Image: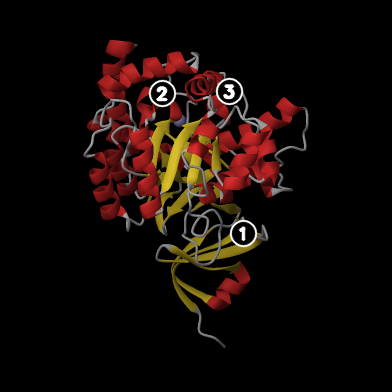
Amino acid sequence: MAMPLETDLLISGATLVTMDPGRRVIENGALAVTGPNIAWIGSADEARMQVRAARHVDARNRFVIPGMINAHSHLAMTLFRGLVDDMPLEAWLARVWEVETAFATSDNCRVGTQLAVAEMIRGGVTCSADMYWQTMTNIRAATEAGFRLVNGPPMIGVEGPGGGFSPELEGQMRAYIEEHLGDPLLRLAIQVHATYTANDRMIDVAKRLAADYGVLFMTHASESRAEVEAISARYGKTPIEVLHAWGLLGPNTLLAHCVHLRDDEIAILADTGTSVAHCPQSNLKIGNGIARVPAMLKAGVNVALGTDGAATNNDLDMLDELRTAALVHKGANGDPTLLPAEQAFALATTNGAQAVGLGDRLGSLEVGKLADLAILDLEAAHVTPLYSIYSHLCYAVDKHDVRDVFIHGRQVMADRALLTLDEAEIKAEVRRIAREVAAVHG
Ligand SMILES: [Zn+2]
């Protein structure tokens, strides 16, 4: 008989929602982890014979999913959660930029990012593609908490806290990228806020850096009708056409929102392999409309799912976002067959991984991939009985069902206790900052 495989951790007895190419769901399954990677997957019975582990997690009556990937966030915006609601995007942006100028300091953004990471881990999210002021601080705050982040040196183009554009910027960005290329929890990205705040110099820098280092390029695109009209007036082209003309569309590009697209623009995204971060709750709340996700998916566009910032959502709950995505297109199109549960769950997992350029490392439970996963309870009344795990994930499961979370093989939540963050202290600190904000802007 072959020697058993020696591993660090064995999670057994659970239903494994692998999201692998065969979309296997393994009942009474087992998953072993060695270092940061998934080392073995099979049935709990096979595991008893084939796997030896230093630590064992009994996951009977639970299910294991790949950690969800938030494809578009502004994490430290948790500081301004609920401050500016019920306004159109342009007025909202003006108000938020005013508050950010005063309060998006490095110290404040560190705590705001920590709060966001705590909230996301609690909701089974293990990775987020983030764009915000004080980027370097936020990267440190998230990765020090053991959380996986997609982010990189900022190039926001509008003057603001820790942002702006200077001739020295490209050199600084290169130095940052070279220093951080090997960071295990950081997928480097170049971020430009949007076509309406970009200029030619910034675009040249973004293109050079993305090409030289193979890093991701992220920006907002076609979020509101007013944006499309303004860009069309300035360039005679839509934001998608402008980005295409600038040579910025491709498999390494992730566009947030894409609410207002014509058929030919969807075809451009499909042809270039560009990914889209669909943020349905933010788009609904700001009254921007409903992105044409079923049409994009049909055309072959890789669509992922994002929460956007806590000032337009107002939470970072990907399970809730998933449910909104699965519901809104059915209602808006009068067609209940659109975005069925399994396809919707792919938006939050495999499509998210592909969107951030980590399709070969994340998004599914497969041997050799990184051990980013969440263990959820199947005991609560609202998930009883169980016929289809995908149905429950889309239409019934709640973030409070998430019990344990592992990122890069390391446990960051155990039986709902956060292991890498002092949540009470973070919440107290955010409440203190909020009192200062409210004194000026409340
Ligand atoms: Zn955004």
**Identity, as a three-letter code, of the amino acid under mark 1:** Asp
Query: Could you tell me if residue 343 is visible in this image?
Result: yes
Q: Is residue 24 left or right of residue 337?
A: left
Q: Is residue 146 left or right of residue 265?
A: left
Question: Which residue is drawn at the image coordinates 37% and 42% (left, top)?
Answer: 206
Residue 184 image-quadrant placement: bottom left
- Which one is in front, 156 or 393? 156
- CA distance separating discs 2 and 3: 16 Å
Q: Which of marks 2 and 1 is nearer the N terminus?
A: 1
Q: Residues within 10 Å of mark 1 (few under 14, many from 20)?
A: some
| Callouts 1 and 3 close, C-beta under 8 Å | no
**Identity, as a three-letter code, of the amino acid under mark 3:** Leu
- CA distance separating discs 2 and 1: 36 Å
Residue 20: which numbered mark, if any?
Answer: 1
- The image position of residue 197, as x and y in percent, is 39, 26
Q: Name the residue under label 2.
A: 81
